[in-house]
Image (cartoon, rainbow, N blue to C red):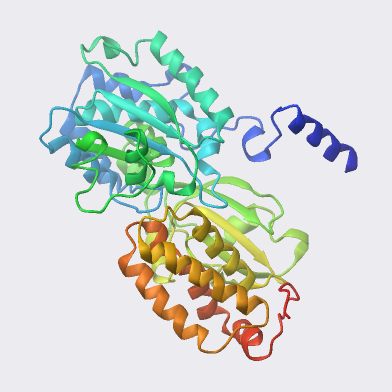
Amino acid sequence: TPDILAGHIGTALAKGRLPHPEVSRAAERLAVDPYESSERYGALRAFVADPDVPGLLAQLKASELRGLGGAGFPTGAKWEIVRNAPADGKYIICNADESEPGTIKDRFLMEQVPHLLIEAVILAGLVIGARTGIIYIRHEYEAQAEVLRRELERCHREGLIGPDVLGSGIPFDLSLFISPGGYICGEESALLEVLQGNRAEPRNKPPFPGTHGLWNKPTVINNVETFVMIPQILRKGPEWFKAQGRSGAAGLKFLGISGHVARPGVYEIPLGTPARELLDRAGGVLGGRALKAWAPSGASSGFLPASMIDTPLEFKALSQAGSMLGSGAVIICAEGTCMLDMALNAVRFFKNESCGKCVPCRVGSAKMVDILTDMTRGRGRAENLAVIDELSETLTLTSICGLGQVVPAPIKSVIRHFRDEIDEHILRGRCPSGVCPMA
């Protein structure tokens, strides 16, 4: 209503905090949290009492927990690589710089279960032999940073972090670092450059952070959600964790859902849940409209048609569908959406966020935006599709980092699944949805 809108505007002008339903709702009991409030940090206390490093790594491996920030690398294997790497210093970094359009799950988790995140980071430090941990958080996440600061202060008071973790004689320091901003700042090697005081530019790989990370030392980098999953695995066991999944997948998953959906927000689901069930849980398509398309993981995953809404939300099934689980940002597109316009907006985002270090991304993304802009304005030509194919191959094969590699995903998926709509723009000079400003 106008009164509510006026109130929000007044709050914003006063630099107050605007309500976000998915994070400001009353705290709910999440399946991922194995603790009553009085029992928190139980996995850490148990490990300090009996520091069985091989046993803990075996539990992580048996759980089949994979990185939940995009790449999906097995978590236990990543920790073991760093544990076994010879070095006189190691680091733990939590990447909380989620900046993919539509991604909000890590923000939710930092507000709801900060103790799980911090506990897992401390455990990781003790397991791999690190003495320093960093939570690298998106600069817009001021409220979440404050929640974490309060929890870190509590941990200091209770001896969970500091010069002598729970009387073990082992020091471990954990601090917050505010990202300077920009999508590229969340790429794992660009993140390392930022922490070292340099410009946010990705490194050439190999070597990888597991052996040559922060200050060229072995470094574990996991995202918020991956860390949050670990205490329940250690408290309830890897078999319990695996049994939470569906469709052959293991564990739980947090997904943000936005776009044309009745109840946008963050939902905790079994990994492998069909996307249709997530959409139903979120109230269905806004206004009862028909579903046209959906993106499993924001701009970088591309778009799938409504006919694929029963695809399980898990690594293998989405890969087979030509997409990916990625950062877990489901975007819903109702009928009436122009998919070419959606692709243009997504590619433009990547172009604007390119660091400019490598030519394929810097030049290729700009060229692709120019082509798609022409297509939405009635200036497209049939030969544009061949150029898009060439640019896509170059970007995918030669870009230094994942940002450049996924630039083509939005338009390639639209060409694959909504070719008639592309042809209408190019061959007949009309936008079927009436969205594009055709000349």
- Image x and y of residue 188, in percent: 34, 45
> 217 or 174, which lies in front?
217
Q: Is any part of residue 391 visible from this angle?
A: yes
- Image x and y of residue 427, in percent: 63, 91
Q: Is any part of residue 307 visible from this angle?
A: no
- Image x and y of residue 172, in percent: 28, 19
Residue at the (23%, 27%) spot, across then down: 130
In screen coordinates, is 66 left or right of 375? left
> 8 or 59, which lies in front?
8
Which quadrant of the figure has residue 28? top right
> 176 or 383, which lies in front?
383
Residue at the (38%, 34%) spot, across then down: 232
Which quadrant of the figure has residue 199? top left
In screen coordinates, is 164 left or right of 111? left
Residue at the (45%, 25%) spot, across then down: 115
- The quadrant of the image that shows the C terminus is bottom right
- The quadrant of the image that shows the N terminus is top right
Q: How many labels were placed on the picture? A: 0
> 17 or 63, which lies in front?
17
- Image x and y of residue 4, in percent: 85, 38
Is 140 rendered above or below residue 42?
A: below
In screen coordinates, is 369 left or right of 156? right
Is 271 rendered above or below residue 133?
A: below
